[in-house]
Amino acid sequence: MKLGVQQVFLKELREMARDKRVLQGALVMPVFIIALFVLLMGVISSSITESRPVSLALVETDNQELREQLSAAKEFEITWVESMSQAEALVREKAVNVGLKLPPASAPGSMEPLTAELALRKDEPLSAIDAARVRAIIDANNKVAVGMMLESQGINKELAEPIRIKETDLSVKEGLGGSQIVDLLPYLIVLWAFYGGMSIVADLVAGEKERGTMETLLISPVRRAAVALGKILALMVVCFVSAMTTLIGVFSLGLLKLEITKNLFPSGLSISFANVVIALGMLIALVAFFSALMVAVSAYARNIREAQTYLGALSFLVLLPAVFSQVIGFTGAENAKWVAWTPILNTAVGLRGVIKGEPDLMLVTGSVVSSLVLAFLFLRIAMQLFRREEIVLRV
Amino acid sequence: MVETENVVKIFRDPKRGDIRAVDGVTFRAHPGKIHGLLGVNGAGKTTLMRILSTVIRPTEGTAKVCGFDVVNQGPEVRNSIGFLSTTTALYGRLTGREMLEYFAGLYGFSGVELKQRVDAAIARTNAEAFADQLCDKLSTGQKQRISIGRATIHDPQVLFFDEPTAGLDILAAQTIIGFIEQMRDLGKTVLLSTHIMSEVERLCEEITIIHHGRIMGEGTIDQLKSQTGQETLEKAFLSIVAPEGVAL
């Protein structure tokens, strides 16, 4: 059996290496997609963090001094309008991000609070960001005004802010842990571990049945279990390479030190050797599970088309936990026991911790054990399917 | 030697119920002779071939190839046989040589012996000119030569040919027929499944006629003619499988 496994494994690898679909699906596409993601995130990150004036429609004010101050301020790009309704119209049309009507200058000694009107579109990210900036400026001015008022009454102006917040950022800032891409990376690794293999697996078994090479193979002395195992091992290589290509793509872009992606890798790309070993262990277990599952599905299908239909539906089962891993931080369930034992989700969440330099033992154990158990289960199913003549020969 | 004893194969179909594709078949094929399995499409010839090559298991009965039981000694049976049909395809992204190397490896050869086997197969089938081209790029005739090399890489004692010339042009078909004769002359047991009368008349010393999974007649060509009182094998065959005539 050992001999048969090796022969089948090497032959499948050789065929895959010559298959354009494998090269495109498992190697080119992951690099292309990750490059696109990183560049896109770089553009978004730059547009948010870089200084950009608040796009503001400001209603004319009788306070000439304030008008001149605002006109001179570089942080505002002001469009002067006659009324608040005009400002709102401009916001609605997305000509400006926010509309603002400042209150008239108050009479000296007046104790009445004043109201400024702010118009924004909460469904537009830039409108929401600019509105927050306007609020922050008004809040700062309020503090100054209150401070001056207190000071005029002989009270310590610091009391304008009775409780101050001293903030300490404890997030990991070293190496990849400090990178904004780190949350996305495990998701992409998990997806490509599956989709890389999906590009070829229909051809691997269902295709052999369709073309008639399966019968040729079954007439040789190789045992069917060895055929199944050889094919699963070969697919594992493709899945693993595809997932690793994502990682290599990110590292390559980081090393290029492009201006557009500088905010994504503020602390470089370092990751400890121990964490690399842990990540690889998790990944190998995951691709073993994916490969055995996909080969079993392909073995069950009558032909390539049927296999692709099944695999397409199956891909959603992979997609859902992978997508959930992206938002699990908002649910507070990241450390729940069930997460550690939910296949795919545990790997995605666990990989994020490992890449950040904070491996969670329960997640890592859960990921490796659950993936290996499922890999063994689907290996058994694949072997059983290869032994069933009505499955192996039906087309 | 190939021998079957009351072999039955039932396929269970959820819609059509049980289908007896092979129904109590008993026959013997001898070394140095070509034994023809003659029958119309769907008669059960391919199913019987698949049972004998261990691809599927018989529902009832026993079958032996070179003395090895097809159910309990599958690897030994497969080591003793070569199988060729128009449906046993090649791997398109391997070259002819790589295809032969792959199967030589599966038959347990390695190193120098593997190389010698492959070179000998290429020489035997006159495939030197195209052995290093991808199988996808080969003509039908060239593919058939590589298939012959694949089927004989391990020098089997028994050869199964299932409709080996179906769909081939006359030149490619002649290559196959010549190869079958060559194998017989080497003392191999040859089992040929076909519905082409001219091939049977040219090649087969012994014939088993199968219809609806059952043996309807057996013997030499002359014996079948005399049993049915017909002048030609074709007429003898038709009188056996369609005694009431063929509806137009």
Image: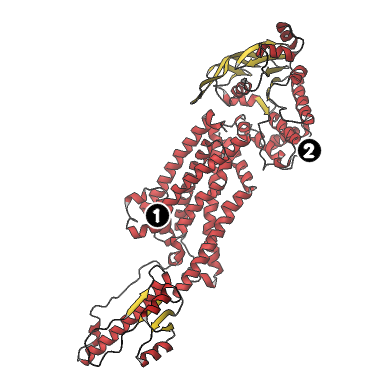
Residue B139 at x, y = what percent? 75, 38
Q: Where is residue A245 in the image (x, y as percent from the top left)?
A: 55, 56
- Asked which quadrant contains residue B44, the reply is top right
Does A55 sit above or below residue A339?
A: below
**Residue holding disc 1:** A324
Query: Closest to the observer: A259 or B232?
Result: B232
Left or right side of B67 for A328: left
Give A107 or B64, whichever is nearer the viewer.
Answer: A107
- Residue at image position (59%, 56%) is A28
- Identify residue for label 2: B128
Q: How many marks?
A: 2
Q: Residue at x 69, y 32 (%)?
A: B150
Which amino acid type is marked by label 1? Phe
Q: Can residue A349 be seen in this view?
A: no
Q: Residue drawn at (48%, 65%), measured in percent from left and top?
A: A270
* Colour pattern: secondary structure
Q: Using residue B115 as the reference point, say whether residue B9 is left or right of it.
A: left
Q: In this view, does B117 lie to the left or right of A199?
A: right
The crowd level at tag 2 (other Cα within 10 Å; few <14, some 14-19, many 20+) is some
Camera-near label (2 vs 1) is 1
Residue A299: percent from left, percent from top? 53, 37
Q: Mark 2 falls within which chain?
A: B
Residue A291 has which mark?
Answer: none
In contact (CB < 8 Å): disc 2 and disc 1: no
Which corner quadrant holds the C terminus of chain A?
A: top right
Identified by mark 2, the residue type is Glu
Same subunit, labels 2 and 1: the answer reads: no
Q: Quadrant of residue A252?
A: bottom right
Local crowd at mark 1 within 10 Å, few (<14), some, or many (≥20)?
A: some
Measure the C-alpha gap from mark 2 to mark 1: 57 Å
User: Which residue is rendered at x = 43% and y = 42% of the image?
Assistant: A374
